[in-house]
Amino acid sequence: MSKTKPEIKTIAVMRFSALGDVAMTVPVLKRVLDENPGVEIIMVSDSRLEGIFSGIDRLTFAGYDLKGKYKGIRGIYRIYDHLNTHYEFQAVADLHGVLRTHLVRFLLWVAGKQAAFIHKGRLEKKALTRAEEKVFKALPHSTGRYGDVFRQLGCNISSESYYILGRGQYSQWFDKAWNITEPIHIGFAPFARHIPKMYNLDRFKEVVKYFDREPYRIHFFGGTRAEQLVIKQWEKDFKFVVPITFGVGFKSELEIMRKLKVMVSMDSANMHLASLVDVPVVSIWGPTHPYAGFYGFNQDPANAIQTDLSCRPCSVFGNKNCWRGDHACMQNISPEMIIKQVKKIIGE
């Protein structure tokens, strides 16, 4: 006699990094909760990212310090043990698909939990980024791959596209709070985790300089110590800057972003964070490409600043040096191209 699977009432969802990938889970989780009223979610992630999930009904955050008590192989077992003994849930959704989550998922499966995991499409991405015989086509957006994991667990989740979308279709999920009166707030996030994804800082400053006047107010965003030092200097270089307070946490940072009329960023976490509060993002793309599935959720494809080169994209994550040696994908982007798109959004 076959054993009947327990009804799924609560799902433990695992996604630890990177920041942008974690941020992209939010619209999917909201859709799952909206379309499955009887389901609750335990979001399992890095303890530092709790603020991203603030205010979501029927979602509990379980944070783990991966650099402390929950580091390494011993930490993997501790995550499993803590989840299994402190929370009641029937299924686990692995949205990360790395060694840590594979092992935690396996242990939970042995403990009797239903389990499903993400299929990342590694072969498709390799075909998109290889130097020769490149298969240049749009791949499923990361949110689509996340959604498929919940479907494996039997959740209802609308099948309409999670691919690169125009704005507006899902804006009802977010508390839209643009500041549509003067002054006009513009965010600038000139940094990325990997150097090849970054636009030249001197040329980026030319973009900022154009808007360093009335009626604009400039906000800079960065996280690491090195980025903070650059921002502090830029706050002195420009007149109409709203100084940033570092270390305020993601919840407060998202509240600051809500004020923006537009964000200018790299292919980086700040693109995804701004997307969560429905702010249009002018994003700058070099070695990576929106076709890999990591474009800002619900962002207009026209706001991606990029050049047509046969070698693009050469990397999924932007962590590889330019094999041509000239970084033309970024060098061929002029400050004027970025300024023009920002002006189009703000109506100047």
Image (cartoon, grey):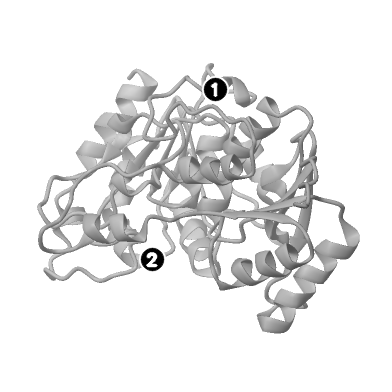
> Is residue 70 in sight in this rendering?
no
Q: In the picture, residue 70 is in which quadrant?
A: bottom right
Q: Secondary structure at mark 2?
A: loop
User: Decide: marks 1, 2 in contact (CB < 8 A)?
Assistant: no
Q: Nearer the viewer, residue 42 or 315?
A: 42
The answer to whether residue 322 is above or below residue 2 is below
Question: Disc 1 designates what residue?
Answer: 171
Amino acid type at image mark 2: His
Amino acid type at image mark 1: Ser
Q: CA distance from mark 1 to mark 2?
A: 30 Å
N-terminal label among 1 and 2: 1
Question: Disc 2 designates what residue?
Answer: 194
Q: Nearer the viewer, residue 304 or 313?
A: 313
Q: Residue at x 38, y 29 (%)?
A: 165
Left or right: where 108 falls relative to 298 = right
Residue 150 placement (x, y as % from top left): 60, 42
Q: Nearer the viewer, residue 78 or 345?
A: 78
Instruction: Specify few, some or many for label 2: CA neighbours under 10 Å numbering under 14, 14-19, or 20 or more.
Output: some
Q: Residue at x 67, y 82 (%)?
A: 73
